[in-house]
């Protein structure tokens, strides 16, 4: 996709709070990539932070919920990629997740987010072999350049980054070119908004960024490939 400036989002784990986040994104015309673990997509997979219940969603209805956004790999069972030591273990965790995503959502995934932000060269080489073309780490750049190595991608920032709004202002004022386009890439988990009670933070960001003629709003795939 050719653009001078683009915004994209990346949210992990397929949990209940995604519903509210999608409503927000759809309202403001934002596009997101959701990184899912198809082997544990069930309310039986849950945990708690500060008394907030964080539960994965039931699989049924998710294709409709995520319509218009991108589904990417996050590992079949959210295992740390660095702890996978054989081709067989990697195939189970990544290839099976790819196959499930294609079956459930109708599109073969081309990207992923590393569970726990963990990755190594063996993981990256394996992913390349199975057609994965970008992989998001948990590193942040505080910049807008397209990633030099998309399989070791750093986001611009996490949504809780203290520089979030400063970066948004800087992005709005900046001018990209066709040769050097700018990408504002934000990542996080939707449950964090409940835990931190700061949904207004995302609403403010969307309001700031929405409806600009010079900004392309795309999924990770659309913005990176
Ligand atoms: Zn995760």
Image: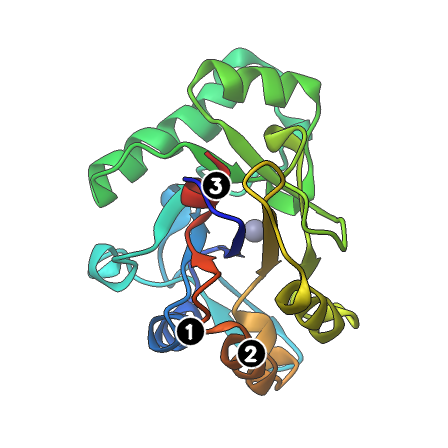
Question: Residue 114 in the image: x percent, y percent?
Answer: 60, 39
Vertical position of residue 128 compared to residue 189: above or below: above
Q: In this rendering, is residue 221 above or below 152? A: below
Q: From this viewpoint, is residue 89 visible?
A: no
Q: Is the CB of mark 2 within 8 Å of ligand 1?
A: no
On the rendered image, what quadrant is the C terminus found in? top left
Residue 220: x %, y % from top left: 47, 46
Direction from residue 42 to residue 118 in the image, left or right: right
Tell me the element at label 3: loop
Point out the image quarter for the N terminus. top left
Question: Of the residues tagged 3 and 2, which is closer to the observer?
Answer: 2
Q: Earlier in the sequence, mark 1 or mark 3?
A: 3
Using the image as rendered, state which of residue 186 and residue 144 is in the foreground.
144
Q: Is mark 1 within 8 Å of ligand 1?
A: no
What residue sits right under mark 2 in the picture? 208
Q: CA distance from mark 1 to mark 3?
A: 37 Å
Residue found 65% across the figure and 16% down from its top: 122
Left or right, residue 36 beside residue 115: left
Q: Nearer the viewer, residue 98 or 208?
A: 208
Which of the marked residues, 3 or 2, is nearer the chain's N terminus?
A: 3
Q: Quadrant of residue 172?
A: bottom right
The dot on residue 77 is 3
- Determine if residue 203 is in view: yes
Q: Position of residue 96 (x, y in %)?
A: 36, 28
Label 1 Cα crowd, 10 Å radius (few <14 / some 14-19 / many 20+): some
Residue 185: % across, % down = 60, 54
**Which residue in the protein does label 1 denote?**
211
Q: Residues within 10 Å of mark 2 (few under 14, many from 20)?
A: some
């Amino acid at each position: 996709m050719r653009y001078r400036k683009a915004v994209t989002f990346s949210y992990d784990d397929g949990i209940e709070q995604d519903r509210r986040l999608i409503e927000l994104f759809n309202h403001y015309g934002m596009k997101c990539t959701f990184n899912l673990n198809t082997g544990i997509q069930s309310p039986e997979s849950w945990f708690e932070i500060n008394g907030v219940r964080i539960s994965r969603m039931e699989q049924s209805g998710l294709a409709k919920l995520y319509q218009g956004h991108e589904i990417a790999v996050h590992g079949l069972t959210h295992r740390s990629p660095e702890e996978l030591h054989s081709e067989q273990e990697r195939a189970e965790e990544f290839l099976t997740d790819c196959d499930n995503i294609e079956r459930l959502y109708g599109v073969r995934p081309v990207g992923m987010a590393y569970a726990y932000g963990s990755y190594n060269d063996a993981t990256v080489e394996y992913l390349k072999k199975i057609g994965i073309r970008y992989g998001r780490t948990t590193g942040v750049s505080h910049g807008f350049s397209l990633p030099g190595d998309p399989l070791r991608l750093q986001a611009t920032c996490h949504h809780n980054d203290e520089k979030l709004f400063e970066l948004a202002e800087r992005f709005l004022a900046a001018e990209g070119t066709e040769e050097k386009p700018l990408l504002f890439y934000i990542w996080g988990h939707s449950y964090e908004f409940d835990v931190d009670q700061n949904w207004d933070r995302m609403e403010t960001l969307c309001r700031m960024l929405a409806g600009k003629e010079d900004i392309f709003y795309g999924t990770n795939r659309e913005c990176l490939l």
